[in-house]
């Protein structure tokens, strides 16, 4: 919940001169990391509590909900702020972060967590 709150605040906070603004595509990398990090935390917590993966629950909780949050933030940036704008490229970067984290969560983390136990 804390990470969701941080994402909401950062998405709506007015940025005049963002740090590292001269780094190419830093904004897109930030989106990939924010939503990938959120999705990774959701996967880790799910796998920590459950023995088996329920595909429907993980799809809804760790993929669909972060994507819906992403879309909502882009719409809020476009229609509820005066100094931010919604961007399809940001939505794509958010989706890439979620998809990469979901692949890790589904393919890598279950094996790693079994070996750790």
Image (cartoon, helix red, strand yellow):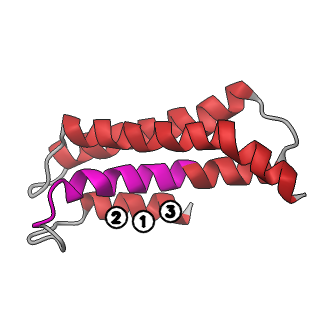
Residue 55 picture location, percent across and down: 71, 26
Task: Name the residue at 36% across, 43% down.
Answer: 94
Q: Label 3: which residue?
A: 3
Q: Residues within 10 Å of mark 2 (few under 14, many from 20)?
A: few
Q: Is residue 35 magenta?
A: yes
Q: CA distance from mark 3 to mark 1?
A: 5 Å
Secondary structure at badge 3 equals helix
**Mark 2 or mark 3, whichever is nearer to me:** 3
Span shown in magenta:
22-39
Say if 95 sits above or below 116 in the image. above
Q: Which mark is residue 6?
A: 1
**Near-viewer residue (64 or 77):** 64
Q: Residues within 10 Å of mark 3 (few under 14, many from 20)?
A: few
Residue that numbered label 2 is attached to? 9
The quarter holding residue 103 reads top right
Asked if marks 1 and 2 touch (Cβ < 8 Å), the reply is yes
In the rendered structure, are the residues bearing label 2 and label 3 in contact, judged by CB atoms less than 8 Å apart? no
Q: CA distance from mark 2 to mark 3?
A: 10 Å
| Image marks 3 and 1: residues in contact by CB distance under 8 Å | yes
What secondary structure is found at the residue carrying circle 1? Answer: helix
Pick the front one: 81 or 90:
90
Element marked by disc 2: helix
Q: CA distance from mark 1 to mark 2?
A: 5 Å
Res. 57 image quadrant: top right
Answer with mark 2 or mark 3, whichever residue precedes in sequence: 3
- Image point 15% across, 64% down: which residue? 23
């Amino acid at each position: 919940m804390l990470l969701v709150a941080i994402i909401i605040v950062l998405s709506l906070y007015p940025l005049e001169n963002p740090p590292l603004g001269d780094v190419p595509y830093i904004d897109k990398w930030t989106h990939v990391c924010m939503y990938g990090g959120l999705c990774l935390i959701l996967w880790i917590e799910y796998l920590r509590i459950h023995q088996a993966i329920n595909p429907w629950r993980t799809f809804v909780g760790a993929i669909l909900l972060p994507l819906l949050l992403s879309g909502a933030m882009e719409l809020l940036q476009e229609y509820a702020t005066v100094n931010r704008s919604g961007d399809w490229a940001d939505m794509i970067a958010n989706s890439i972060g979620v998809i990469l984290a979901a692949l890790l969560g589904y393919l890598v983390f279950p094996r790693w967590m079994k070996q750790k136990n």
